[in-house]
């Protein structure tokens, strides 16, 4: 099999892959929705398709971050964006922690645990975008 060299055919192939990914994702969502309706939330999360769905959406989000950083038109300060993003994330986590602590049935431990998980899950993509912006700025300076 020969490698595709024509850019139009390469773009068409990528569009076909994207359509197949969308149909596959809709199928997974449909199966998980059926499990949710028939078996409840625990039945849906016990399905192995749940893990596949979470992994593919996370991977898709990270790949989209790479494209969006490359598409940014103006040169921005990565440190400024990092500081603003971390500040907003910490404020959101504090608000969630306070609200959870005040709700009946939850205690202070729940008010620390959930915001801690959200903080950890938020810091990873924020640092990844910071790294991509630093790399892009270094590449622009080299050119």
Image: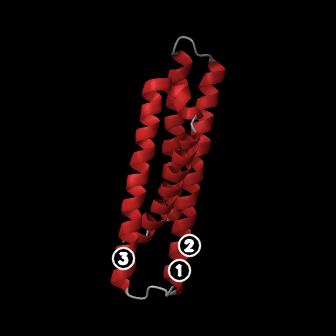
Residue topped by disc 2: 135
Query: Distance between the Cα atoms at labels 1 and 3?
Result: 25 Å
Q: Callout 2 environment at 10 Å: few (<14), some (14 to 19), or many (20+)?
A: some
Residue topped by disc 3: 11
Whether residues under marks 1 and 3 lie with C-beta atoms below 8 angstroms apart, the answer is no
Query: Distance between the Cα atoms at labels 2 and 1?
Result: 6 Å
Q: Callout 3 environment at 10 Å: few (<14), some (14 to 19), or many (20+)?
A: few
Q: Earlier in the sequence, mark 1 or mark 3?
A: 3
Q: Earlier in the sequence, mark 3 or mark 2?
A: 3
Whether residues under marks 2 and 1 lie with C-beta atoms below 8 angstroms apart, the answer is yes
Whether residues under marks 3 and 2 lie with C-beta atoms below 8 angstroms apart, the answer is no
Picture quadrant of residue 43: top right
Vertical placement of 53 versus 47: above or below?
below
Q: Residue at x 59, y 33 (%)?
A: 46
Q: Secondary structure at mark 2?
A: helix
Query: Distance between the Cα atoms at labels 3 and 2?
Result: 26 Å
Q: Nearer the viewer, residue 22 or 80?
A: 22
Total marks placed = 3
Q: Residue at x 62, y 35 (%)?
A: 116
Q: Residue at x 51, y 74 (%)?
A: 137
Percent coordinates x, y for residue 60 in the rendering:
48, 57
Vertical placement of 61 versus 89: above or below?
below
Residue topped by disc 1: 139
Percent coordinates x, y for residue 138 in the rendering:
55, 77
Q: Residue furthest top?
A: 104
């Amino acid at each position: 099999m020969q490698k595709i060299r024509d850019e139009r055919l390469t773009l068409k192939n990528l569009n076909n892959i994207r359509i197949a990914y969308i149909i596959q994702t809709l199928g997974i969502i449909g199966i998980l929705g059926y499990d949710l309706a028939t078996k409840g939330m625990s039945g849906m999360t016990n399905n192995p398709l749940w893990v596949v769905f979470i992994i593919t959406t996370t991977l898709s989000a990270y790949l989209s971050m790479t494209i969006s950083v490359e598409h940014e038109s103006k040169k921005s300060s990565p440190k400024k964006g990092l500081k603003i993003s971390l500040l907003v994330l910490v404020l959101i986590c504090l608000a969630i922690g306070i609200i959870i602590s005040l709700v009946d049935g939850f205690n202070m431990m729940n008010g620390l645990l959930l915001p801690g998980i959200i903080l950890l899950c938020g810091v990873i993509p924020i640092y990844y975008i910071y790294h991509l912006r630093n790399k892009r700025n270094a590449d622009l300076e080299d050119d």
